[in-house]
Image: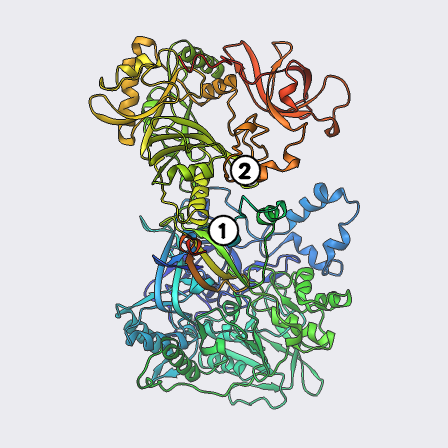
Amino acid sequence: MIINHPLLGPRDSAEFVYLGAATLMDRPDPDTATAEEWHDYGYLRDNPAGPHRELWFHEGGDRSILIVTRNTTTHEITAVELARTVGART
Amino acid sequence: MTQKNRLGGGQVDRNTTLTFTFDGKTYAGHPGDTLASALLANNVRLMGRSFKYHRPRGPLSAGSEEPNAIVELRSGARQEPNTRATTAELFDGLAARSQNRWPSLAFDAMAVNDRLSGFLTAGFYYKTFMWPAAFWEKIYEPIIRKAAGLGSLSMQADPDTYDKGFRHCDLLIIGAGPAGLSAALTAGRAGKHVILADEDFRMGGRLNAETFSVADMAGADWATQSVAELSAMPNVRLMPRTTVIGAFDHGIYGAVERISDHVAVPETGKPRQILWRIYAQNTLLCAGATERPIAFENNDRPGIMLAASLRAYANRWAATPAPRVAVFTSNDDGHRTARDLHAKGVKVAAVIDTRADAPRSHDYEVLQGAQVVDTMGRLGLTFVEVRQANGEMRTVECGALGVSGGWNPNVQLTCHQRGRPAWDDALAAFVPGGTLPPGMVVAGAVGGQFSTYAALKSGADAARQALGLKGRAPRIPDAEDAPVEQTPFWYVEGCTRAWLDQQNDVTVKDVKLSHQEGFRSVEHLKRYTTLGMATDQGKTSNMGGLAIMAELAGKTIPEVGTTIFRPPYTPTSIGALAGRMRGKEFHPTRLTPSHVWAKERGAVFVEVGNWLRAQWFPLPGETHWRQSVDREVMATRASVGVCDCTTLGKIDVQGTDAATFLNKVYCNGFAKLAVGKTRYGLMLREDGIAMDDGTAARLAEDHFVVTTTTANAGKVYQHMEFVRQCLMPEADVQLISTTEAWAQYAVAGPNSRKLLQKIVDAEYDISNDAFPFMACGNITVCGGLRARLFRISFSGELAFEIAVPARYGDALMRKLMTEGEAFDVTPYGTEALGAMRIEKGHAAGNELNGTTTALNLGMGRMVSKTKDSIGSKLSERPGLNTADALVQVGLRPVDAADKITAGGHLMHADGPVDAAHDQGYVTSAAYSPTLGHMIGLGFLKDGANRHGETLRLVSPVTDLTVNVEIVSAHFVDPEGDRVRA
């Protein structure tokens, strides 16, 4: 696969490490979250046949973590964002 | 050495004669020959034995689709089994051998299987070797394995090298036949970056095998001229001998280039093969088509081959399998073979055409509406039995029979992204359909454009379309443009032992049997009969099987569908896939700066991850490792020892929010850590399980240096980046791994300060008052060399860790040894390190094993309740905090002579030994030279409250039962006086 890095352009996916679903960024609020919310965050993942937002760590590159929207059935990548930028917006 | 069946013309270089051997007999051929064409020219038709029945076989084809002529090439370490004689390029001195026969190819004892064929039908193994079940592993399987299989391995290491490479292009053209060449000329002349890859050693595809003219010259000459023009273009890269094996995601193609397969020994410095990863903006597949055979009784005798292959041997290689041939066809294409062979002076005994209206010829007899119903000739074809239109039988004498059932487009690569081919009624064949890999278009025969003109035109058009070229379309040279008409004809009525898959010996009868037994899915048919599962992946056989299955099920062929095509397109050597990743290049070794010094000292090394670390340093006279390790421990505790701890992960954390960040990743607090102080930190996973531990030293308000365990250095760094970028994106904190930048040594023992005082520059006071336990700071050593000093201790002694830039690591170690002579300084390795940390009760990888929590590790109170950190919430889960939760304890044998082993479980002193009564387990064990007996660390239910209890340590695996006393894990200096000294 080729991942279109927002800063570095198209890079081979072999330079990256897959970190899991992008929902990992939505860490429950430690002050208010219920045990159930922590459980869901820790253990539940969607397994869609279609677009999936996921984290890719550019370990062999600039060490950015990217949010890649990849179609799990075709591997088509429709969006690539810097996790840090997205995280700072939300 | 006469080439009895060599014809005139062709594209072999008669000025040079190559000598080669097949089964020990010497033959002659020419450059341009394949092994198969040279053997045929030498009147050798028998080249192999089939997989199951050991039937005598000769080549079916003249290309990579070959199922039969599978041979072993070369000898010694370069011996290579299961190669196709039809693609093996002849070179001088080539030694080839037939396979799967004993004692000889002409007389094969295992051919008795053929007589037993009534029993050895589809599913034979499944039905026969079921009972008794215990027989399978010990008796049936070894016998079957011995009888089956084709070639043999040399059992030696491959002496050749393989490489990998990366290439980029605007247009990748796969296949250099008329369509591919036409496309390459169009794209190349437009200045585009083109890669033209072809599996053959001579580009031109069918143009080399046909007698058609292109632009008023022989097609082969037009191909030669086109290749010459292309090779002069700097923007075009020609890759002959290169098979594109797979279409992967996002326009990435895998291709194997056979650099040295056509020479006896690779040229110096050249690899045998290269696996290319080609990044193509656009791809044009011009893979052509494969002729399909017709199934009839005994259609597998040497001499029976595909009709277009028969004429390829005559036209390109000037070879015929026999001086007298016949053709069996269901379409006009078969007649081309008869015409071409007749023109070459080969006697055409008859053309047997299934069609009643087949065209007639002046030059040879055409039997209209006739079918071949049987053949004769044990080791090579002698006669074919023909049933004529009027029902009369007739025997035709011939040494070769060309068979043509039409052509199948080579759709394989169009399906590698799970695309399914579409059925074309007019062609009676599957063509590329559905969703092709993004960026791929097709041209030529693979797209159903079967005439030469149509191939040339579709190639040029497709290249223009793919690249978006504007302007006038190029002129297409004049070429043959015969209409294409394919009459489906799959098998001759009434045949049973009619081979579909010749390599795996699957017959029409097998397919019928599998249908009768209820196998309805094409994927099940494949696996039950093994149709299409051989090295050729059914390139010549799948369609026949599908057609018969469709007929039996009363369905159409597209309703039955095809099996899924997967990479690789043709067999690929493991060497090419591995490339340079062999031995140490697969698993590289990382060496610390003191490695050379340690080697000089005679150290024994151990692999820790990719690192080599000194395990112990034997002295003369020490014959057992324990002697060395015990000495190292005792010397360190008595005076001073030095250990290389460079391999521990080091991460630099900087920024105004560095302390806030560490507060988040460590479960214990770091915000209030003073500058110049170090603190132990425990890192949890979000689920509350311990991930790693280490120290964080605050060198400045906004600067920490974090250490990790050797094994987790990469993982911890990754985790910290996740927290930084995904959870704390607005924090001002930067991370960088500095593991390789600093050489670091532990200097431990009561005399460690005295030793360091000899090298630390005088302006730095490292006395106990100025530099107490857990202090850290930037210092200089040896007269100005910048260094970092940490007063931390893993051994439990007064100890420091000193770090210098990596390039000074060797010098510092040597300096410590020289200056330490006064204190009998002792270098120690990882074994002594391990023994001392167990004596001190420090947890390590054995304890942080991915199942243990802070509570288990006896550090439950370290998890701060006053702040949020990764894992703090989920570590509070009730299930992790039960009253009988496992807690780390120390173990000592009741009888000091007894052994303690890691991995054993703890049971009550009496009672049953089973999982239900399990009290805990042992994680680490070592001989304690300080105490004079073995000690251990382990986890015990409610362990903190059970010190003094006696339990049984059992290890059923090693047959060990020992009484142990539960004690504090701090065996040595439990009050910690020494580290503060």
Residue B214 placement: quadrant: bottom left
Q: Name the residue under label 2.
A: B872
Under mark 1, the amino acid is Met
> Camera-side residue: B741 or B967?
B967
Residue at screen point 40% across, 38% down: B588
Residue B5 drawn above or below residue B481: above
Residue B685 drawn above or below residue B259: above
Give the numbered dot on residue A25.
1
Q: Are marks 2 and 1 on the same chain?
A: no
Q: Which-is-in-front pick, marks 2 and 1?
A: 2
Disc 1 residue crowd, few under 14, some 14–19, many 20+, Cα 10 Å: many
Left or right placement of residue B179 versus residue B322 in this view: left
Under mark 2, the amino acid is Ser
| Residue at the far right in the pictured view | B132
Give the numbered dot on residue B817.
none
> Camera-side residue: B473 or B351?
B473
> Camera-side residue: B271 or B419?
B419
Does dot 2 land on a helix, a strand or a loop?
Answer: loop
> Camera-side residue: A72 or B793?
B793
Residue B621 visible (yes or no): no
Residue B68 placement: quadrant: bottom right
Disc 2 residue crowd, few under 14, some 14–19, many 20+, Cα 10 Å: many
Residue B6 placement: quadrant: bottom left
Residue B412, horizontal then vertical, whole percent: 52, 68
What subunit carries mark 2? Answer: B
Left or right placement of residue B549 versus residue B105 in this view: right
